[in-house]
Amino acid sequence: MSKNWHLAAYQFNPESLRIARELRGFQKTELATQLSVTPAAITQFENGTSKPTAQTLGRMTMALGFPPEFFCTAQKSVHANTCHFRDVRASTQIERKQMVAVSGIVGNVIDYIEKELELPEEQVTPNIVKRPERLEDIESIARNLRNAWGLGLGPIDNLIGLLEHKGIFVFRLLSDCERVDAFSLFLGKRPVIFLSTQKGSTSRTRFDAAHELGHLIMHTDCEPGSTEQEREANHFASCFLLPRETFISECPHRLVWPIFRDLKQRWKVSLSALVRRARDVGKISDHTYKRGNIQLSQLGWRTQEPNEPPVEHPKLFQKALEILSEDNITLEKIAQDLAVNPTDLHKWIYADAVTVPFPLKEIIEDQK
């Protein structure tokens, strides 16, 4: 596309400005100051009632760090009120909007890849259910999903690997948006989960992943944000990671920490989640549950738990790129075709993580 400023201004796409602004974490007033226009003008640019001049577009590209082509390219429109966030109280609206804007760019990349490569078929949609009327119903929902996915009733060794095997893309949150905690959404027909990896607890990150899976399975048709939905997703994660039948047979009737630490190593679930599950299935009393939480705090295990499982890295996207690179389709080429900066795209995709190899070809073969 030509970089003629007047042509780019004429072809201006309003949604591109909103995405770019929210991705950079700018309020309308802040961006208006940098562009020497009023906040009302930014609103008009974003709702399509007016277009920036070529000169304003030039300042826009400088302020936001996007090439002019980006602002006249169709973008995937995602809004924060369509995403299930793990804990909205811990994050700001700006941080949530920033990560949602990132998810839109990520969605464009996923679409790009799916045109070139056959990825694992997503197996969330066939298992979506109506929101449960009672918390007790979630036990059956989790058991049915385990049955559908052929998991049996034992521990899940690598939860992130399982989710990717079932066609769910998993990404890390940007380091400057870690307070967002976690969120999930469908980008087109592809389920996507974003997770924080800065909690200092890999068992809790696994629980977050299962929590977001619960949202994708149970809350697709619900408006996100209610505390009831968060409670339901927590219960789903507990039921999914610790199936009732097996856990009851292994869990003691008393709060014996060495046994619970052994259970943690086997199931890769945090001690606090194990104690909560023990209470929920009737193995310990409410009094013992409260005492257990007090002891967890006294021992310092709420912030620094012992016996943490290994880190589970998202690997599906990286291996997809490795396969595409055999046809000279690199992340740099994708960035160029999507009119974004390659350095930015690498950050949004990998969140500054060190990438690691993974046998994606084997996953794809298993789906055939």
Image (cartoon, helix red, strand yellow):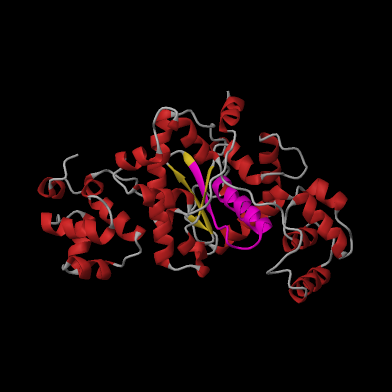
Q: Nearer the viewer, residue 193 or 131?
A: 193
The answer to whether 266 appears left or right of 124 in the picture is right
Q: Is residue 224 left or right of residue 72?
A: right
Q: Quadrant of the C terminus?
A: top right
Q: Could you tell me which residue is drawn at 57 percent across and 52 percent down?
A: 212
Residue 259, position as x, y percentages in the image: 87, 59
> Does 172 appear in magenta?
no
The image position of residue 43, as x and y in percent, is 22, 62
Above or below: residue 246 compared with residue 29: above
77 relative position to 53: left or right: right
Q: Quadrant of residue 232?
A: bottom right
Question: In the drawing, does residue 148 fall left or right of residue 351?
Answer: right
Residue 185 vertical placement versus 330 (above, below): below
Question: Which is nearer the eye, 295 or 349?
Answer: 349
Q: Quadrant of the N terminus?
A: top left
Residue 341 sits above or below residue 199 on the image: above
Residue at the spot 39% in from the left edge and 59% down from the top edge: 98
| Viewer-side residue, 262 vs 130 | 262
Q: Where's residue 54, x and y in %?
A: 11, 54
Q: Residue at x 27, y 51 (%)?
A: 16
- Res. 282 visible in picture: no
- Given residues 3 and 33, the one toward you in this image is 3
Q: Position of residue 331 (x, y in %)?
A: 40, 40
Does any portion of residue 226 appear in the rendered image?
yes
Q: Residue 39 sits in which quadrant?
A: bottom left
Residue displayed at 88% across by 64% down: 256
Q: Is residue 263 above or below residue 332?
A: below
Magenta region includes residue 206: yes
Instruction: Please provide the residue range marked out in magenta.
Output: 191-217
